[in-house]
Amino acid sequence: MFGRSTIRGGFRPENLGQNALTLIGNIGFSLFVFGVLIFTIIAATYEPEDPLFHPSDKITTFLTSTSNATLRSDDSVVKTGEDFMVANQTAFAEFINITDVEATNTNETTSEGEANQLECDVNTPIDCKDQEVFHLMMRATIEKFKDIHFYKFGKPVVGEGVNSCDMAWRYRPKDGKSAAFYKDYRRFVVGKSENCSLSVVGIGEYHSGLNARKRKKNQKAGFEKTGGKKDDFSLPVVGETVNDSLPLVESDSVFKSGKYLVYVGGGDRCKSMNHFLWSFLCALGEAQYLNRTLVMDLTLCLSSIYTSSGQNEEGKDFRFYFDFEHLKEAASVLDEVQFWAKWGKLHKKRRNRLTLHLVEDFRVTPMKLAAVKDTLIMRKFGSVEPDNYWYRVCEGDTESVVKRPWHLLWKSRRLMEIVSAIASRLNWDYDAVHIERGDKARNKELWPNLETDTSPSALLSTLQDKVEEGRHLYIATNEEELSFFNPLKDKYATHFLYDYKDLWDENSEWYSETTKLNGGNPVEFDGYMRASVDTEVFLRGKKQIETFNDLTNDCKDGVGTCNAATS
């Protein structure tokens, strides 16, 4: 009966062709419906990986695409604007060679040198402003630091004593991968022989030449290669004095004529740093789209995943972690405390009445707010997660219109100064290995081989083909017991983050500056700061050996996730 009801005429020979076509059509339609059902289920449940934690080539692809609204919680160190910059190889190629200095020195000082020989007085103090001294110091610097390219030398100034001079320079490591410049200033001891010929007797440690840190008023320009890249303010310069004071509040008339955007409330507080940035940059992107000043809260709640107490900690300052000086110079932002003080003062005066446009639904897109004329647009978020996350504003149709301005947010230059100091103490000539252990090494179900593959004997075996014996080896690790790595000292000069804790202890410049920034209260060098510095020092190694790419075959996110991580 089934056959009669579905295939008319039965199975007589003259009907076989028609019946076969009907049967094939029914099967094809059934497969199509089944395929649509499967695709719908996948589409509803699929959540792509956060592209911020992919390699740089995938990050570039991500940033040029329109699909930028997906957030995945992660406790990794976040990437910021400078990580996405493509190094300008043309600018970096114009570095100063020792021949540039020698050629200039020969032309300028031959006649002066002959005159000095006739007037020789070994007791005369060293003249740090003398051109011969300047060129002597430059040559000594280039000869000593062979793994560095120099781009600018500042004029020497008097150090301490009759035979010392301080000099600053801008540089970057020869094999540097990051798009950034660095500044160092050191103290030189200049010796004078019996015939008054000069020589550099010694060069001080990193940042020892404090008198050359800031360029003095009316000080003449130093030495820079002709045709070289002049000051490029689009690139970070680590080592310059940081000025991250709050922006000045404009006059009453200017403030009244301005247009502002503020986000209030929401569930983003005390989440991971990745979550914070994803939401903050959404707000900043909307402010730029609307051509408004973003009113921002400079206080952060640090998630428990980064704190020594294991609890969320309020009262952290945005400037501890990010470069506010660059942000305020490159974008229009205002601290909310300053803003509300000015707003309240003007709003009390009836003739200065300011207008407010309140938005309480994240689905109201920035495009719908473009025509709003009110002084302030306030987005108010509720208490129900995840609809009260700021980044929801940048989802849907907004994705292709509002772009997150990653280039505006850089890492704290105070933290990067610690990175630079560590690399400088290693003369920028070291290899680095990242060894992840901790909870993952103890979880045999998801990482069955990690503990064994990162044992000292396994590390020695693996590293012997990757790192030359005797090399300086920086070990970035979450292993709490650093003596665990003692066997590696037989083959390598090992270095760890805590070997350099003087860079953030109570006698350090970082401690002094952050304490001042924090109203006189000491600032803890917290877990996020440690992870950030550890990662950045690792990334500046000449060779970079990763746990899950080079030391073990286990997958970074557990068994069966390797293909997903690389796709």
Image (cartoon, rainbow, N blue to C red):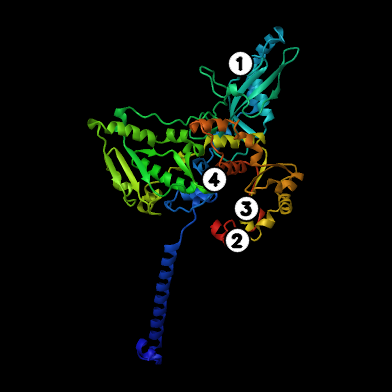
Q: Amino acid at mark 1?
A: Lys
Q: What is the three-letter code of the residue carrying label 4?
A: Thr
Residue found at x 45% / y 30%:
245
Q: Is residue 227 above or below residue 471?
A: above
Disc 2/disc 4 C-alpha distance (Å)? 26 Å
Q: Please say if the residues under marks 1 and 2 sit with CB atoms less than 8 Å apart.
A: no
Along the line of sight, the residue nearer the viewer: 203 or 487:
487
Left or right: 32 as drawn, with respect to 220: left
Asked whether disc 1 touches disc 3, contact meaning CB atoms under 8 Å apart, the reply is: no
Q: How many residues crowd around disc 2 within 10 Å: few (fewer than 14), some, or many (20 or more)?
A: some
Pick the residue in front: 31 or 158: 158
Q: Which residue is mark 2?
A: 446
Callout 3 crowding tier (Cα within 10 Å): few <14, some 14–19, many ≥20: few
Mark sitting earlier along the chain (3/4):
4
**Which of label 1 and label 2 is nearer to you?**
2
* Quarter of the image with the N terminus in it: bottom left
State the mark number for residue 198. none
Instruction: Tell me where residue 366 appears, x and y as whole percent.
Output: 33, 46
Residue for badge 4: 307
Q: Amino acid at mark 3?
A: Gly
Question: Which residue bears the numbered disc 1?
Answer: 129
Percent coordinates x, y for residue 72 in the rendering = 48, 54
State the SS at label 1. Answer: loop
N-terminal of the two: label 3 or label 2?
Answer: 3
Q: Position of residue 50 (x, y in %)?
A: 49, 53
In front: mark 3 or mark 2? 3
Quadrant of residue 103 in the image? Answer: top right
Cα–Cα span, label 1 and label 2: 64 Å
